[in-house]
Amino acid sequence: MSSAPSERRLGTARRVAILTLQRTEPGQASRTHVGAVADGLRDTGWAVSVTQPARTRSRVGRLFGAFSCQREYARLLDEVDVAYVRLHPLVLPAVRAARRRRVRVVGELNGPWEDYLEAHPPLRLLEVPLRRWFRRVLAGLDALVVVTSQLAQWVRQFEPRAPEPRVVPNAADPGAFCPRPLDGPPFRVVYAGALWPWQGVEDLLTATARAEWPPNVELLVMGAGPLADQVRDTTARGPVRFLGAVEHSMVPQHLSGALCAVSPKTSHAAHGRVGQSAIKVYEALAAGVPVVVTDIPGQREPVEESGGGAVVPEGRPDRIAEAVARLVSDSEERQAMGRAGRAWIEQGNTWADRIALIEPLLRRPGTRDAR
């Protein structure tokens, strides 16, 4: 029989096991987020382990990896106080394993379950059972962290038995992103993130070919995904430079001194309803760089609250180009945006501030009745 949580904790640091079924790769926001949460909890005295699937290019391999790493994770649960699980339609076995061991289960949700069907179309064949599984996952949690208020409302409607969500948006580390004077000309506009259709990358590439796009300004793209070849092809025809996936430690040197950063997300799938908390937005603000974002919940609010950039309609490459041109022509406004964004991050929007919201959920004693 497994030991009770209080017995496992006796005489040792509190222990939390983080599980992510999406393997974190260089250039992905998930890698940044998992690392920030793990490091932040360590800084508050927790012993932290992270479990994720092995790297594989095969879809079948990824499916088997999702279950094999949960078996590995289950073996860790006899030695920890809290299971911190990044939610995924296939994560039910891990949640059940934690509940059987009376380990407190805290879930982290970054988007609705339909996101996984968009990213992995073959899973649509299992849509009905996966929906049922995901509801059981939510109902089996002791606490839940979500990244936008709209996503919290989605949870309440999708599974009323889920614990009340705590909204904890993304953040940035101001110590890693240091403002510096504008580089150039040529000036650079930075996109650092995944290259999926809903990220608005195609609109961004179109913007660079518009008449409104100013001269002596290049678009620097860092990231990986299905649209990588399209970005690479554009480099031969326009002011676009493509670095591919880069380690997160390299992002600050490309972002600091940029004209601006961009996050041109679209309301593809459920994103318009539940929002997107984009790490790239927070990191641009931390670097003192204005950020141009589309009017999508979750990324609009940091820009509006901070005054650190411009919000443009989604699907309008011309408006993206116009916003970039304005930042070239109005240096006073650009500098004021940069200062305002940096100050907003420092005044309550760092990763340390987010850990202060998450850590009490881990310390709360006990588990809810199994559902």
Image (spheres, grey):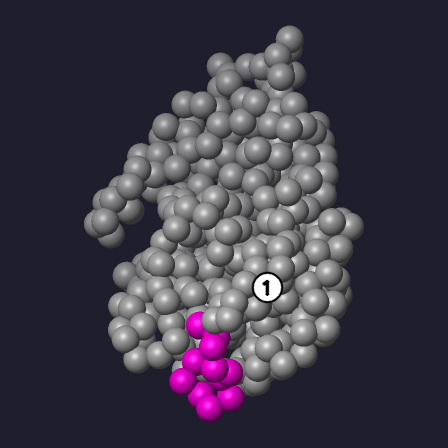
Q: Amino acid at mark 1?
A: Leu
Instruction: Please give left or right for residue 138 compared with residue 44 in the image.
Output: left
Image quadrant for the C terminus?
A: top right
Report whether residue 81 is seen. Answer: no
| Spot occupied by residue 166 in the image (x, y as percentages of width and height) | 69, 49
Against 370, residue 260 (above or below) is: below
Mark 1 surroundings within 10 Å by alpha-carbon count, few (fewer than 14), some (14 through 19), many (20 or more): some
Against 30, residue 269 (above or below) is: below
The quadrant where residue 42 appears: top right
Residue ranking furthest to the top: 11
Which structural element holds mark 1? loop
Residue 214 on the magenta span: yes
Against 282, residue 66 (above or below) is: above
How would you classify the magenta stretch by its main secondary structure?
A: loop
Report whether residue 342 is seen. Answer: yes
| Spot occupied by residue 48 in the image (x, y as percentages of width and height) | 54, 27
* Relative depth, front residue between 290 and 145: 290
Residue where numbered disc 1 is placed: 182
The quadrant where residue 127 appears: bottom left
* Relative depth, front residue between 103 and 349: 349
| Spot occupied by residue 141 in the image (x, y as percentages of width and height) | 58, 41
* Relative depth, front residue between 145 and 48: 48
Instruction: Please give left or right for residue 61 compared with residue 193 in the image.
Output: left
* Relative depth, front residue between 345 and 334: 334
**What range is drawn magenta here?**
208-218
Residue at 28% across, 61% down: 122
Residue at 49% across, 14% down: 1
Residue at 44% across, 71% down: 219
| Spot occupied by residue 213 in the image (x, y as percentages of width and height) | 49, 84
Residue at 36% across, 54% down: 245
Instruction: Please give left or right for residue 27 compared with residue 365 in the image.
Output: left
User: Number of labelled discs?
Assistant: 1
